[in-house]
Image (cartoon, rainbow, N blue to C red):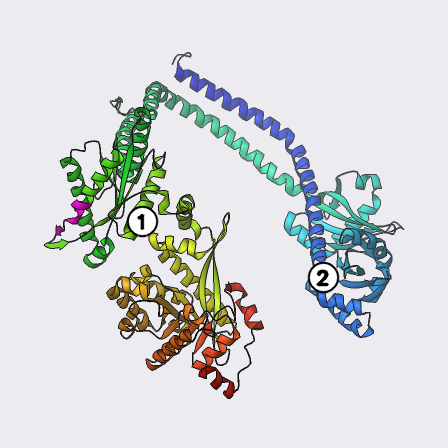
Amino acid sequence: MRFRSLESRIVTLFLVLIVVVQVLGLLVIQRGIDSNARSSIAGELNNGAKVFRRLLDQNAQSLRFGARLLARDTAFVAAIGNNDDSDHATIESALANSGRRIKASLAILVGADRKISVSTNPAQSAGLEKLVVSMLDKAEQSDGANGVAIVDRRPYQIVVMPVKAPVTIGWVVMTFPIDRPLANDMREVSALQTTIITHDTRGDWLAVGSTFVGPSIDSLVAQLKAKAPAQLYGGPFDLNIESAKYSARLLPIGEDNGQTASVVLARSIDEATAEYARLERWLMFLTAAGIVISAIASVLTAKRIAQPLTELTVTAKRLEQGDYKSQIDTSRQDEIGALAHAFDSMREGIAKREQEIRRLAYWDTLTNLPNRAQFLLLLNDAIVDAKKRDHSVFVLMMDLDRFKHVNDVMGHSFGDALLRQVAGRLQLLLVNRRHSSAQVARLGGDEFAILLPGFDIEQAQVVAADVLQALETPLSLEDQMVDIGAGLGVAGYPDHGASGEALLSMAEVAMYAAKQRNYGAVVYDASIDKSSEKSLSLLTELRNAIERNEFRLYVQPKMVLESGKVVGVESLVRWMHPERGNVFPDEFIPFAEQTGFIRVLTRWVLDQSAQLCHDMAAQGIHLKVSVNLSTRDLLDQDLPVKFADILARHQLSPTSFCLEITESAIMDDPVRAQQTLERLHAMGVDLSIDDFGTGYSSLAYLKRLPVDELKIDKSFVLNMENDAGDTKIVRSTIDLGHNMGLRVVAEGIESEAVWRLLAALGCDQGQGYFMSRPIPADQLTKWLGTWRAPIALAPAAIDALVAK
């Protein structure tokens, strides 16, 4: 083995480094064990001093917090302010209770005359009076002060807190003994032996609390007496306690009338050096073994490692650059050959997986069309090209009509086959029309898009008309004819946006407008939405609002009109946007309806309402919670299952809820809506027809729906006292509901006169601004405590109201 070869240099350098480092390390360790142990102990003692001061600070904070709570207690302040002997017992009881809660040994009230007026331990407080009085001014200026007092040679933490109303009318004083429990806490936190000790003016030392026991404490005190002050306070010093050697530090913690309170922190030197001695023996053994093993290993492996490494390094760099065609020599039959073979297999695997990842990331596996990510890349590229060539780019976005219904009725496999046929029909259309540059993509679900680079608006509208016409022809699947259609939105560069994301968003807005207006295709225009930018932003932010916890649950109470008893609440949702502030429901509920997000929102309201109902029941308050259901909710066949899950999680009965539906929501798909309502009613939940009287087919469907309640629309209730026509409509609606065995609720009650008129007409329940505006759910309990119903009318007055 030549010395200049890589193998020989690896072996030689490796052995020399191992021997030199290990030998030098042993020499340094042998010389440094004692000094390192001493340094480590000194560091522990320094840290221990900080930890002990922090324990004292924590105790002081606890005392200040307890004293502050008492000093700001309204009843306590009032008792002091009365300056009445009858309140002396109340003040003393409050001091004792507060002190007991925070484990204070003494609680004192100093009056405005700066004398102790009340104390839980008069004998002990007498020794503290001088120090307390000296702290009063500082406590008043800094909203509290603390210090250390020594009474009968025992140290105490003391806290003084002013009592203001609003001027200072007294001071609350709390004390905490500094003794053995604190020493034990310090021992648990830092593993240091801890002794609390005091030094009086005669030079005597007294240990008031220690983690040492018995003779060890006496030995420690004797050694402290024998040492000069310069030795004690100059830094760490040694102690010999019961044949064990300790390094100790004396930390002053307070002074009172010439008396000093200190803490002695001690660390066993023998324990500290024991670990170093064991480490030294292990290092000597490991050094010898490491030198032998390293010599053998370096000789055996150096020859087999160096040579092929350069080739593999070059290949790795090519792989990093995306070159997966480089060949690797795998002819060797040793470990390096296996490594080269594994490297080659890795190269092939990475190439295949990257190709598959790109396919999965950018292509839809169901239709083999570009997905949303790939379509966006193509769209942005087309926009860049359009900027260079000064021409237009248009995007068509479509959403299939009735696809969800087909999916629910026929199954997902049928729906997948339908999507594949739609994709094929769109591709065939573009081929037949010779639109070679156009590209179809599936964005997700039943949404498709077509990219039209180089097209103008007239050409894009022609393609849109061709697409709608192609989709009008029924599709044949599994011997069944499926009639579908689509809502189609059109947006283009540069007229509507300058980026791919913006064009897709605007095409989506136009598509929703087309579906809402039942138009075939709609070209994006700012007039579609009066506040287009705000609406687009709102549409995006709505999807993340629940995750950001921006929605708030509000409730409006419902009560029995005859007695005024509150029997339920209607749940309402408010959106507290971090930038826009309070967004009114009229601004975001229509968007939630359009996007289908209303289902998520309804589930959130149901869950929050169930939590509110559960919390109220825990307080003995049992109210029926009403929640509005939208059209999309009624068409969700899984709604009963989701609702049952919410009830189970919150341990509620279905009778705790009343679900409200509008007549227009029922009319969108009467058959599916009735199926959903029947399943909900079978669970035991109440159902209510909301805004009754404003729809088209109230009587036609009312007799077939499993409802329990009618809610009279507020448009008839608001002006009842001034409009005889409205009164007649309300009277007829009440009679109709009662004749059908339904509960009748009036909403929009804004005056006591309307309340009384409705009660006289026999209306069961009501809600409105007269009783309460919608309030945050967490304020309901407080409102219930303040609600007072109007005084009931005499029978003659009721007859007079009805006769009007």
Left/right of residue 493 with respect to residue 186 in the rendered view: left
Of helix, strand and loop, which one carries label 1? helix
Which of 546 and 703 lies nearest the eye of the viewer?
Answer: 703
Q: Residues within 10 Å of mark 2 (few under 14, many from 20)?
A: some
Residue span colored magenta: 468-477
- The percent position of residue 516, horizontal first and vertical second, equals 30, 52
Of helix, strand and loop, which one carries label 2? loop
Residue that label 1 marks: 513
* Mark 1 vs 2, N-terminal side: 2
The number of numbered discs placed on residues in the rendered structure image is 2
Q: Is residue 730 above or below residue 39?
A: below
Dividing the image into 4 quarters, which one contains the N terminus? top left
Give me the disc on residue 38: none
Q: Is residue 533 above or below residue 379?
A: below
- The percent position of residue 230, horizontal first and vertical second, equals 83, 39
Q: Tags 1 and 2 in contact by the CB under 8 Å rule? A: no
Which of 5 and 705 lies nearest the eye of the viewer?
Answer: 705
Farthest-out residue, bottom: 796
Q: Residue at x 30, y 67 (%)?
A: 696
User: Residue 84 occupies which quadrant of the picture?
Assistant: bottom right
Q: Nearer the viewer, mark 1 or mark 2?
A: 1
Farthest-out residue, right: 202
- The percent position of residue 528, horizontal first and vertical second, equals 35, 47
- The percent position of residue 483, horizontal first and vertical second, equals 16, 53
Residue that label 2 marks: 72
Q: Amino acid at mark 1?
A: Ala
Left/right of residue 490 with respect to residue 717 in the rendered view: left
Which of 770 and 242 lies nearest the eye of the viewer?
Answer: 770
Q: Residue at x 54, y 26 (%)?
A: 22
